[in-house]
Image: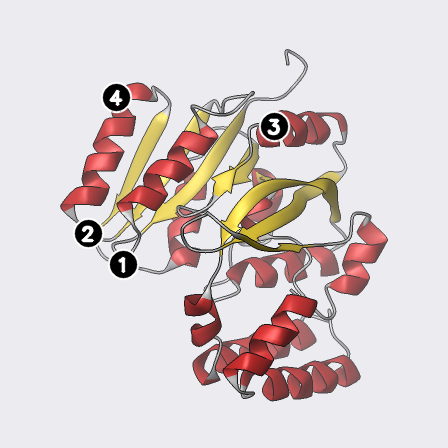
Amino acid sequence: MSDTENFSVLMSVYNKESSINLRQALNSIWMDQHLRPDQIVLVKDGMLGDELNDVIIYFSKIIPCLDVVSLPSNMGLAYALNEGLKCCKYQLVARMDSDDISLPTRFAEQIAYMSSNKNIAVLGSQVDEYDMLMENKVGTRVVPIKHEDIVRFAKRRNPISHPSAVFRKEIILSVGGYPLFERAQDFALWSIMLTRGHMFHNSPRVLVNMRTGDGMMNRRGYEYLKNELRLLNFQKEIGLLSYFDFICNAMTKCIVRLAPKRIKKFLYSKFR
């Protein structure tokens, strides 16, 4: 691995996260990885409870490169990631969510690819989705591999699964970092980058296991729809979507988000 670049991992955690999930996530990016990160930046997005703090203290003792950034209050994921990004020492940054699991070969594969392909700004992967206990697989989120297919896919759906992303810090900073959206801040960021001509790629392999479940489906109602429509308008304004694309997407999302739960679950299983 001597020909690979050094890299940071960027995470954020807030007080509603499970301490078990955080422990599993940190284990997966340190104890279980074939290639360990050179730095882990963990942002505490506001005050945390004792159980979460105990997990962080434990890993601070066994991970010498763990840097903890504390925010005085909960500011939201986009703000927290932007603050954490400022503290990343290396140009290659791997995203990690506090409730997901990176498979052992993730960093070895992704960092080698990014080290050999300097033209790629963002690299993602396929993602397996599990129930909240990480016991039963419920599906796979399949995303396109090649840049030109990613561009087309982005006009309808998010082309990069956020917890699988590795990107170049200087490019993210050059476009202003994560837009301060309540949700879908990653898709908003990818949208800006695509309109500015930055190159994307996805690994054909599954490199991350992600938690989903009925809780996620229950959240995808009216409030979620409002955030989606805001994102669509943003994508239209920056030129990712034509007016026709905007209208088609808005109509589709209105129908899906306001549909009964069983229909939403069926549609999500087909078009995750």
| Residue depth check, mark 1 versus mark 4: number of the one nearer the observer | 4
Amino acid type at image mark 4: Lys
Residues at marks 2 and 4, CA–CA distance in whole angstroms: 21 Å
| Residue depth check, mark 2 versus mark 4: number of the one nearer the observer | 4
**Numbered badge on residue 175:** none
Q: Earlier in the sequence, mark 3 or mark 1?
A: 1
Q: Earlier in the sequence, mark 2 or mark 1?
A: 2
Tell me: 209 left or right of 125. left
Q: Using a 10 Å C-alpha cutoff, classify the residue at mark 4 as few (fewer than 14 neighbours), some (14 to 19) or many (20 or more).
A: few
Q: Are marks 2 and 1 in contact (CB under 8 Å)?
A: yes
Q: Which residue is mark 2?
A: 47
Q: Secondary structure at mark 1?
A: loop
Q: Are marks 2 and 4 in contact (CB under 8 Å)?
A: no
The part of the image, by quadrant, that contains residue 218 is: bottom left
Q: Using a 10 Å C-alpha cutoff, classify the residue at mark 3 as few (fewer than 14 neighbours), some (14 to 19) or many (20 or more).
A: some
Residues at marks 2 and 1, CA–CA distance in whole angstroms: 7 Å
- Relative image position of residue 258 (x, y in whole percent): 54, 88
Residues at marks 1 and 4, CA–CA distance in whole angstroms: 25 Å
